[in-house]
Image: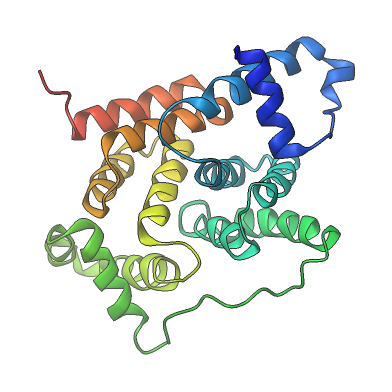
């Protein structure tokens, strides 16, 4: 099967019979897009359609490309992702892109859910309380990054200690501990989010190592970043892959 036939098959699986408006106004661009994304990128590497759609959701959320996000919420449901998994993927973006952009995305997710008669709010996935969110967040942080976390906290200047506490309690306590998506998936999605931001290579390298520590191998990371390529472009993709190769060098 050539890439054109592959793209038609994959597009129909994701979007059904929907026809993009660009096929009328810009058919050449839409044909290039469909053939590349759905005929090549979707078939590269070792990730399934559910994982790919979760990645697409977080990258579109990070980019604030909200019309495309709505289309991929429907696609995510079509490949079998649950409303909980979709919401949790978008929630995971909040510590990295901020609340306003996350709320923009969630509003669009909710619009799709309402058209499909998905009752809101969905079941809470919260697993921490006010008195233990720092403790549990720090525990997850150490599970991902190891003893370097304690060293980083100890080395932090006194006037920045609150940032370290926010990182542990908010980023990891409030979000990483949630149900609905497992730790390996959350860490893979986080890598894709920080890759998409651009200019966050230090965090990309940290999360490459974090992914290794939770069981995502180099091939998986390359596949995930490759899947981001059509949505974030070559410069950020190549920068991210350089970070992967720096942290996990190729064997000679």
Q: Nearer the viewer, residue 207 or 200?
A: 207
Q: Residue at x 62, y 60 (%)?
A: 82
In the image, residue 22 sits, relative to residue 112, either above or below, namely above
Q: Position of residue 88 (x, y in %)?
A: 54, 62
Does residue 117 appear left or right of residue 57 in this picture?
Answer: right
User: What's the residue at 52%, 59% (across, down)?
Assistant: 94
The total of numbered circles placed on residues is: 0
Measured as percent of width and height from the top left, residue 79 is found at 64, 47
The quadrant of the image that shows the C terminus is: top left
Quarter of the figure with residue 114:
bottom right
Compared across the picture, whether 221 is left or right of 41 comes to left
Name above or below for residue 7 compared with residue 2.
below
The residue depicted at 60 percent of the width and 65 percent of the height is 84
* Residue 106 position (above or below residue 61): below
Quarter location, residue 32: top right
Query: Closer to the camera, 235 or 126?
Result: 126
């Amino acid at each position: 099967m050539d890439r054109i036939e592959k793209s038609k098959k994959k597009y129909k699986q994701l979007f059904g019979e929907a026809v993009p408006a660009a096929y009328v106004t810009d058919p050449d661009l839409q044909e290039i897009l469909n053939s590349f994304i759905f005929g090549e990128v979707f078939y590269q590497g070792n990730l399934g359609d559910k994982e790919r759609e979760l990645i697409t959701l977080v990258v579109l959320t990070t980019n604030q490309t909200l019309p495309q996000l709505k289309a991929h919420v429907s696609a995510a449901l079509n490949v079998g992702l649950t409303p909980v998994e979709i919401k949790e993927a978008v929630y995971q973006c909040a510590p990295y892109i901020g609340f306003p952009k996350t709320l923009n995305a969630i509003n669009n997710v909710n619009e799709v859910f309402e058209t499909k008669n998905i009752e809101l709010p969905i079941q809470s996935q919260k697993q921490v309380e006010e008195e233990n969110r720092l403790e549990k967040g720090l525990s997850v942080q150490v599970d991902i990054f190891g003893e370097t976390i304690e060293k980083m906290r100890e080395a932090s200047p006194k006037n920045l200690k609150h940032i370290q506490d926010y990182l542990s309690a908010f980023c990891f306590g409030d979000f990483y501990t949630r149900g609905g998506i497992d730790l390996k998936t959350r860490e893979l999605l986080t890598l894709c989010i920080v890759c998409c931001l651009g200019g966050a290579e230090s965090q990309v390298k940290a999360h490459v190592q974090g992914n290794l520590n939770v069981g995502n191998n180099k091939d998986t990371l390359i596949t995930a970043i490759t899947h981001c390529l059509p949505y974030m472009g070559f410069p950020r993709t190549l920068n991210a892959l350089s970070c992967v190769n720096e942290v996990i060098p190729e064997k000679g």
